[in-house]
Image: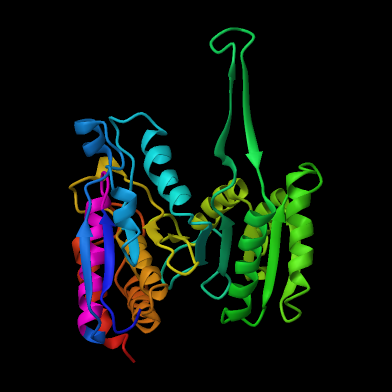
Amino acid sequence: MSGRSLRIASIPGDGTGPEVTAEAMKVLAAVSKLDGFAYEVETLDWGGDRYLRSGELIPEGGLELLRTKSAIFLGAIGHPEVAPGILEKGLLLELRFKLDQYINLRPVKLLPGVETPLAGRGPADIDFVVVRENTEDLYCGVGGFLKKGTPDEVAVQQAIYTRKGCERCIRWAFDFTRKRNSPKKTLTLVAKTNVLTFGHDLWWRTFQEVAKEYPDVKTDYNHVDACCMWMVKNPDAYDVIVTTNMFGDIITDLAGILQGGMGVAAGGNLNPDPGGVSMFEPMGGSAPKYKGTNQINPVAAINAMAMLLEHTGQPASAAKIDRAVAQVTGTKMKSQAAGKMGYGTREIGDFVVAALGSASH
């Protein structure tokens, strides 16, 4: 992507989404000026307000528009006047599935100055990555009701796993572990093979077969319940985790708390294939009660922008943002919690911009 203009679709979304997106864009403008790369942003008003106004989630031609972009930046979705599930399923999951963003990438890194609930642990102890399959499992929406609303009601929700889906996620995770700057070089499969003896047997067999092609990568296995225990007890044992869609959804929230909360956690929904379009977002949600108060933590959104740059051909700029964020969290912020940071949303963004200069070295 270097030498060409980055074409970014921005979906600021709902609640505080536009506020944290503005800070991420502020940092993007500053680092692009420092590093001399060109970019353009097209802002899309998709989200709760548009849905309430028009009944429309993704407008006609919307997916085709996104396919012309280098990447998507999503601020947040979730509107208090829209029933739960409508925006999540009709917008977020729809984009993941239709754009085949089959990797959910969640770095779990404790930043300097950020408190973790784990006593005695610091940044050297919490630095791992979760690779979550992003287009299969219970999220496929296969199932239905029988006799709904009666005492005899039956609800069926089916998990779908394919060899292709398992293998492409596992293979990507092995490649990622091989390239990751970590002495551990260990990929841990997290599943539940002792109970989910069909779908997770497919995951297990695929993992074992692909592992033969990566003799330089160590492998391990955790049942998901054991993983939750070990993430709390020994987070430093992990390097890269690969897991299913449902389990990945759950353990990354636990991981987010270990790294200090959703105010600093960012993630990517990746289609790493040639021509694929990926989407990057803060994990904290729309937090509508903080809308317009300048109190929400923008660090997660800024971290998401760093991820976007890393995956679109600007890794040096991404690293520069990472160093600037670490400098700010280590010296300026009293807390990561909304309303308790010691500074406002816009001020934190300004601090990161100011730190970019010293982060160049």
Does the magenta-highlighted stretch encompass residue 8? no
Q: Is residue 63 left or right of residue 251?
A: left
- In the image, 55 versus 334, the foreground residue is 55
Q: Residue 269, can we see it?
A: yes
Residue 56 lies, with reference to residue 182, above or below; the image says above
Q: Residue at x 40, y 80 (%)?
A: 315
Percent coordinates x, y for residue 110 in the rendering:
48, 68
Residue 305 lies, with reference to residue 213, above or below; the image says above
Percent coordinates x, y for residue 65 in the rendering:
29, 55
Magenta residues (range): 12-33
Give the colouring mode of the picture: rainbow
Toward which corner of the image does residue 167 lie, by quadrant? bottom right
Does the magenta-highlighted stretch encompass residue 24? yes
Q: How many marks?
A: 0
Percent coordinates x, y for residue 275 in the rendering:
42, 67
- In the image, 313 versus 152, the foreground residue is 313
Percent coordinates x, y for residue 209 in the rendering:
78, 66
Q: Residue at x 66, y 47 (%)?
A: 161
- For the C terminus, the quadrant is bottom left
Q: Is residue 86 left or right of residue 11?
A: right
Q: Is residue 297 left or right of residue 147?
A: left
Q: Is residue 283 left or right of residue 171?
A: left
Toward which corner of the image does residue 49 lie, by quadrant? top left
Q: Residue at x 63, y 54 (%)?
A: 165
Q: Residue 126, can we see it?
A: no
